Image (tube, coloured by chain):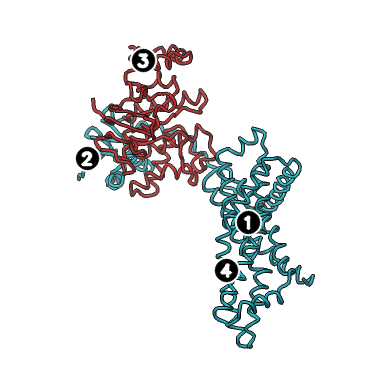
Chain colours: A red, B cyan
């Protein structure tokens, strides 16, 4: 199994507070890895470290064989990121937002760029009537879809999702989960996804990484559910997690 | 013929295109050039044979699909065959998307709006907005007056410090320099008449009546007007203003009134400092290069400039302050959606407040002249 992202002995400290201590994590090709953890357990810090937006105190991170350095250009053509709030550029229209990475990384003629951007918008389930709108005119769910279209603009091999379903209503969240699964199955994507949505965790993730005790516990959904760690037990023991588990019935993983 | 992406076999009635290599995003330009070489004759069936394909993504699939669409528009039939399982799904995506797209593209009839109508509409909208702006300002002042609270006092003192006390050095330096400039310019002209001593009159009167307050106000408009608009704008974007309303705080009371009051208090104080620095600048030149002694200078100032001149200048300060604060807070609170808008509104706040200061100053100049002050 190919390792796409490899985090080795990562240490992150803020003052005296240790967030990650010798954290090691591998993300495999073509998997959907769900990342969970309590508030302040360093989920976002981990993702930001991998993306080169955060300078770790020590440790090495390799993505697609390339070592990640803080604020240095990483393999930005091979990854797409969906930030929590969408992080669309507010001064550009939806169409321009999606075209921006294409314009930055290729010398395609305008019409081709335009076509490809429209294609990505359609793929993420948006209607082209939103193309000329500004992000502020869109709903939260649509903004996330546009942001996903932008993340997919360069045909990435890795997709990072930061709480993709947070703030969406259950219908939109389910649709978004379906969209992610669909894209994953059809575009040969490796996906790393921070989420607190237990439905997404049980429904679409292949493996789960739980950030506890300044380190990480990784395993398939079944393995994580069998874990004896008290925090993990309580996380998946709460009623809503139990309900989600029964609803999904472990169909995907207990075969 | 053949290249890295396709090789073409021309058979009677058929054109077989063997698609091969890497049809990916990076190669889109080259791919478009390559597919442009697929030039069948009329009546030929084009077969894209895709078994030799090594790699494909959405962008590559689109190029392929786009070419076959172009051909069908020319009335030439084409088929895409021989895909490996892992490759076809990309083409499927493109076909699906194109299907949605055709369904969506119901033509929207372009509405021709008459230029006149558009102009009238714009004029009407501008007028309506201006009236609305005035109403908003009146409302916020009314809010403050009706239910003054203790929060306002503390905030006001803070604003006096930020907009007044902290601006003293920069305002003084600027008016000092302007005092020097005025004295130099006046000296050049008045020397011709042998009336060098009138330089003192000119500097002290122009600084106290006009320049001191005008420079202080423009400085404050640039400094605090932009700060007001930007601060309130960001608070709007962060939903802080909404949060205040929900908690029962009136943003007008907490944000607008203290800023207006603070500036109304701060600008007159700044004006006094500006007057002092401006006259000091004039004094430096008078004593340094025109041979007027310090005593002469003071005497001359006292003789030429009465308290009325000073009050004329000072009386304009609260009005200017009111204009700056009202325009800036109003524009700040008008920010609704984007960072871009924030920049736009901040610019508007500064430009409009300086514009209104100058207009008001021209009005005052006429008024005071008519009144004979």
Which numbered mark, 1 or 3, is in the foreground of this view? 3
Which numbered mark, 3 or 2, is in the foreground of this view? 3
Q: Which of B114 and B69 is in front in this view?
A: B114
Distance in Å between CA atoms under marks 1 and 2 = 59 Å
What residue is shown with label 4? Answer: B176
Q: Position of residue A146 (x, y in %)?
A: 45, 37
Give the left or right position of residue B134, taking residue A42 as reference: right
Give the left or right position of residue A241, taking residue B234 as reference: left
Whether residue A52 is situated above or below residue B350 in the rendered picture: above
SS under mark 3: loop
Taking the spot 58% from the left edge, 60% from the top edge, the residue there is B219
Residue B16, visible in the rendered structure: no
Distance in Å between CA atoms under marks 1 and 3 = 72 Å
Give the left or right position of residue A35, taking residue A173 as reference: left
Q: Nearer the viewer, residue B372 or B235?
A: B372
Q: Where is residue A175 in the image (x, y as percent from the top left)?
A: 46, 25
Q: Earlier in the sequence, mark 4 or mark 2?
A: 2
Which numbered mark, 4 or 3, is in the foreground of this view? 4
The chain containing the residue under callout 3 comes to A
Distance in Å between CA atoms under marks 4 and 1 = 52 Å
Disc 3 to disc 2: CB gap under 8 Å: no
How crowded pointer 3 is (Cα within 10 Å; few <14, some 14-19, many 20+) is rated as: few
Taking the spot 66% from the left edge, 72% from the top edge, the residue there is B206
The chain containing the residue under callout 4 comes to B
Q: Earlier in the sequence, mark 1 or mark 2?
A: 2
Do marks 3 and 2 both belong to one polypeptide chain? no
Q: Which of A124 and A75 is in front in this view?
A: A75
What residue is shown with label 2? Answer: B11
Q: Find residue A229 and name its label.
A: 3
What residue is shown with label 1? Answer: B115
Distance in Å between CA atoms under marks 3 and 2 = 69 Å
Give the left or right position of residue B240, taking residue A63 as reference: right
């Amino acid at each position: 199994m190919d390792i796409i992202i490899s985090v080795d002995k990562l240490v992150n400290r803020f003052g005296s507070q240790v967030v990650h201590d010798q954290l090691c994590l591998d993300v495999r090709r073509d998997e959907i890895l769900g990342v969970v953890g309590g508030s302040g357990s360093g989920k976002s810090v981990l993702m930001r470290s991998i993306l080169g937006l955060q300078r770790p105190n020590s440790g090495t991170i390799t993505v697609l064989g390339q070592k990640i350095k803080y604020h240095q250009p990483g393999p930005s053509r091979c990854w797409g990121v969906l930030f929590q709030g969408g992080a669309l550029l507010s001064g550009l229209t939806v169409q321009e937002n999606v075209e921006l990475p294409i314009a930055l990384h290729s010398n395609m003629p305008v019409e081709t760029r335009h076509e490809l951007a429209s294609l990505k918008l359609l793929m993420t389930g948006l209607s082209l009537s939103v193309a000329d709108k500004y992000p502020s005119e869109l709903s939260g769910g649509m903004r996330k879809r546009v942001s996903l279209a932008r993340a997919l603009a360069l045909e990435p091999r890795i997709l990072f999702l930061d709480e993709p379903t947070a703030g969406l209503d259950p219908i939109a969240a389910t649709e978004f989960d379906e969209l992610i699964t669909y894209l994953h199955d059809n575009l040969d994507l490796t996906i790393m996804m921070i989420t607190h949505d237990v439905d997404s965790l049980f429904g679409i993730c292949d493996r789960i990484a739980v950030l506890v005790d300044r380190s990480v516990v990784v395993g398939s959904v079944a393995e994580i559910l069998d874990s004896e760690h008290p925090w993990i037990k309580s996380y998946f023991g709460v009623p809503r997690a139990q309900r989600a588990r029964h609803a999904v019935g472990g169909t995907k993983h207990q075969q | 013929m053949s290249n890295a992406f396709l090789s073409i076999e021309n058979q009677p009635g058929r054109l077989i295109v063997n698609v091969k290599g890497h049809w990916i995003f990076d190669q889109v330009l080259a791919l478009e050039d390559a597919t442009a070489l697929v030039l069948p004759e009329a009546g030929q069936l084009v077969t894209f044979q895709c078994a030799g394909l090594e790699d494909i993504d959405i962008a590559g699939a689109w190029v392929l699909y786009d070419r076959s669409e172009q051909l069908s528009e020319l009335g030439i039939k084409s088929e895409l065959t021989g895909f490996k399982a892992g490759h076809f799904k990309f083409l499927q995506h493109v076909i699906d998307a194109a299907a949605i797209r055709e369904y969506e593209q119901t033509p929207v009839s372009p509405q021709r709006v008459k230029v006149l109508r558009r102009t009238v509409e714009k004029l009407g909208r501008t007028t309506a907005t201006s009236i609305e702006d005035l109403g908003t300002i009146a409302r916020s002042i009314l809010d403050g007056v009706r239910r003054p609270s203790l929060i306002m006092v503390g905030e006001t003192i803070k604003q006096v410090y930020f907009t007044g006390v902290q601006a003293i050095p920069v305002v003084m330096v600027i008016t000092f320099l302007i005092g020097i400039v005025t004295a130099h310019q006046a000296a050049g002209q008045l020397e011709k008449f042998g009336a060098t001593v009138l330089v003192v009159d000119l500097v002290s009167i122009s600084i106290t009546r006009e320049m001191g307050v005008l420079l202080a106000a423009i400085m404050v408009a640039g400094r605090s007007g932009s700060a007001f608009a930007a601060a309130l704008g960001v608070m709007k974007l962060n939903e802080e203003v909404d949060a205040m309303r929900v908690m029962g705080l009136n943003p007008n009371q907490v944000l607008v009134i203290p800023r207006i009051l603070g500036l109304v208090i701060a600008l007159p104080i700044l004006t006094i400092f500006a007057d002092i620095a401006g006259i000091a600048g004039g004094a430096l030149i008078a004593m340094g290069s025109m041979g007027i002694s310090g005593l002469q200078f003071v005497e001359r100032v006292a003789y030429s400039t009465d308290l009325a001149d000073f009050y004329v200048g000072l009386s304009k300060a609260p009005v200017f302050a009111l204009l700056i604060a009202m325009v800036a807070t109003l524009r700040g609170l008008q920010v609704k959606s984007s960072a871009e808008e924030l920049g736009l509104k901040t610019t508007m706040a500064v430009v409009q407040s300086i514009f209104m200061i100058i207009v008001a100053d021209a009005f005052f100049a006429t008024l005071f002249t008519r009144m004979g002050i």
